[in-house]
Amino acid sequence: GSRTALQANFGLSEIQAQAILELRLQKLTSLEIEKILEELRAVLAEIDGYLAILASRELLDKIIVDELISKLDDLGNYKPPKPRLTTELRSYQLEGYEFLARLAHLELGALLADEMGLGKTIQTLALLDARAHLGPALVLAPTSVCDNWCAEAERFAPNLRPVLLRGASREKALTDLGPGDVLVASYEVATRDADKLAHIELATLVIDEAQALKNPRTKRARAVRTLRAGFRLALSGTP
């Protein structure tokens, strides 16, 4: 009778009600038992919360997997656009560009790790040009090569509009960005202007000399993680 009453009055399972009865045998007061019940309810509510989160994550994972499978099925019909550069890509560079374009089509990330001089920049410019219609892009690089990125873009990818983020004109450069615009910023500038850059919806984010972000706890790495981009490409010549 007592166990049934506990189950009915407090919504307890048979095991929980039996545990309470055993506590009573230990001569606990009603107030002490009520406090234990409150703590038990709090624990059960927390468990229910965790279970709800897990169920939501499982559903989200299923949606992501189903979407990826659908894109993989469609990948056979996807043909990367022909590069519109002022120079011809070498065969291995063309293969690299097409591989990157397919990964971008799947909305996955990529790491292009070639030794210096094999054409990481030209392959990246081909990709930036192919994705230019989707919106602005951002190239993060060491200060020493930012000018070179702008010069190479102007030379080989005339359809792109490189914009160097430097000095007092940085804020103006971030306004009215659109398809074809390619922001070029040093890691220092990107860290300093992280809040402003985080509000820009980028089609492509290029991270040159990506080994500069190998420590995820640095302010620089945390700033880069706040950036929003449809596709992220890391470049490195360092194994």
Image (cartoon, grey):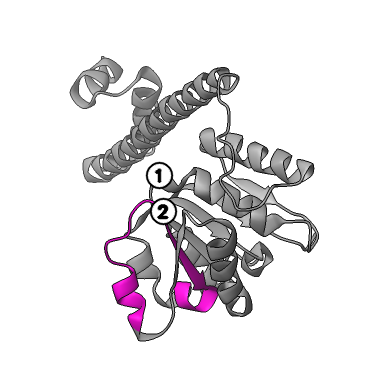
Circle 1: is it few (<14), some (14-19), or many (20+) Cα within 10 Å? Answer: few
Q: Is residue 124 above or below residue 9?
A: below
186 part of magenta stretch: yes
Residue range corresponding to the magenta coloring? 169-190
Seen as rendered, the residue at the extreme front is 86
- The type of residue carrying mark 2 is Gly
Above or below residue 72? Residue 33 is below
Q: Quadrant of residue 148?
A: bottom right
The reply, left or right, for residue 239 in relation to residue 122 is: right
**Is residue 108 rendered to the left or right of residue 53?**
right
Residue position for label 1: 133
Direction from residue 136 to residue 208 in the image, left or right: right
Dot label at residue 180: 2
Rendered location of residue 117, percent (x, y): 78, 62
Picture coordinates of residue 47, whole percent (x, y): 39, 35
Q: Amino acid at mark 1?
A: His
